[in-house]
Image (spheres, helix red, strand yellow):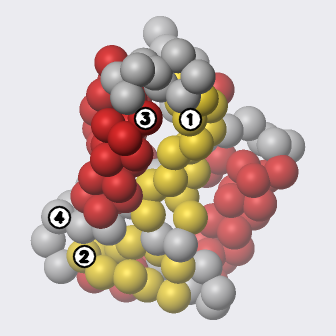
């Protein structure tokens, strides 16, 4: 698998992303965009071919809640909490939170800005080998 996310910022959520993308597709939704927002994994989907949109919204609510308990950098589920990194809310374990330097935070912000504006690609464009 090739990971084309900017700065590989959300590698800790890769399994969660893969699992819930499959669940959403099985429910008839097409994932059009995914990103980190306010410290959780956020999906945007196209539901026009879905038989039950309530099921899709339940799946989205579930992945958002799960992502708040998993470090977005390393995938740890221990000592995870919200970290305010100067206006950017991240979900980090204490170990990753301690390791972030101001330089790292600049790159994380740049990656999220590029992701949001489409200047660097987005999760919907992850290429699989």
Which residue is tagged 4? 77
Q: Nearer the viewer, mark 3 or mark 2?
A: 3
Work out how far the residue at label 1 is from the one at label 2, CA to CA, in angstroms: 27 Å
Q: Earlier in the sequence, mark 4 or mark 1?
A: 1
* Residue tagged 2: 80
Q: Earlier in the sequence, mark 3 or mark 2?
A: 3
| Number of numbered discs visible in the structure rendering | 4
| Corner quadrant of residue 97 | bottom left
Q: CA distance from mark 2 to mark 4?
A: 6 Å
Which residue is drawn at the image coordinates 31% and 47% (left, top)?
A: 58
* Residue drawn 60% across the image and 71% down it: 104
> Which of pointers 3 and 4 lies earlier in the amino acid sequence?
3
Return the residue at label 1: 45
Figure check: 102 above or below 12: below
User: What element does badge 3 sit on?
Assistant: helix
Proximity of marks 3 and 1: CB atoms separated by less than 8 Å: no
Assess whether mark 4 and mark 2 are in contact (beta carbons under 8 angstroms).
Answer: yes
Q: Position of residue 64 (x, y in %)?
A: 37, 58
**For residue 108, side relative to residue 82 (left or right):** right
Residue at mark 4 to residue at mark 1: CA–CA distance:
26 Å
Q: Is residue 86 left or right of residue 2?
A: right
Mark 1 or mark 2, which has the lower sequence index?
Answer: 1
Please name the residue that numbered disc 3 is placed on. 53
């Amino acid at each position: 698998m090739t990971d084309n996310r900017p700065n590989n910022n959300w590698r800790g959520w890769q399994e969660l992303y893969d699992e819930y993308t499959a669940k959403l597709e099985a429910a008839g939704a097409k994932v059009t965009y995914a990103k980190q927002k306010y410290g959780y994994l956020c999906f945007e989907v196209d539901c026009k071919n879905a038989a039950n949109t309530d099921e899709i919204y339940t799946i989205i609510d579930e992945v958002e809640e799960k992502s708040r308990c998993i470090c977005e950098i390393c995938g740890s589920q221990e000592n995870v909490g919200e970290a305010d990194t100067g206006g950017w809310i991240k979900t980090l374990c204490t170990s990753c939170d301690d390791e972030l330097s101001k330089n790292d935070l600049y790159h994380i912000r740049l990656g999220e800005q590029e992701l949001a504006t489409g200047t660097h690609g987005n999760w919907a464009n992850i290429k699989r080998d």
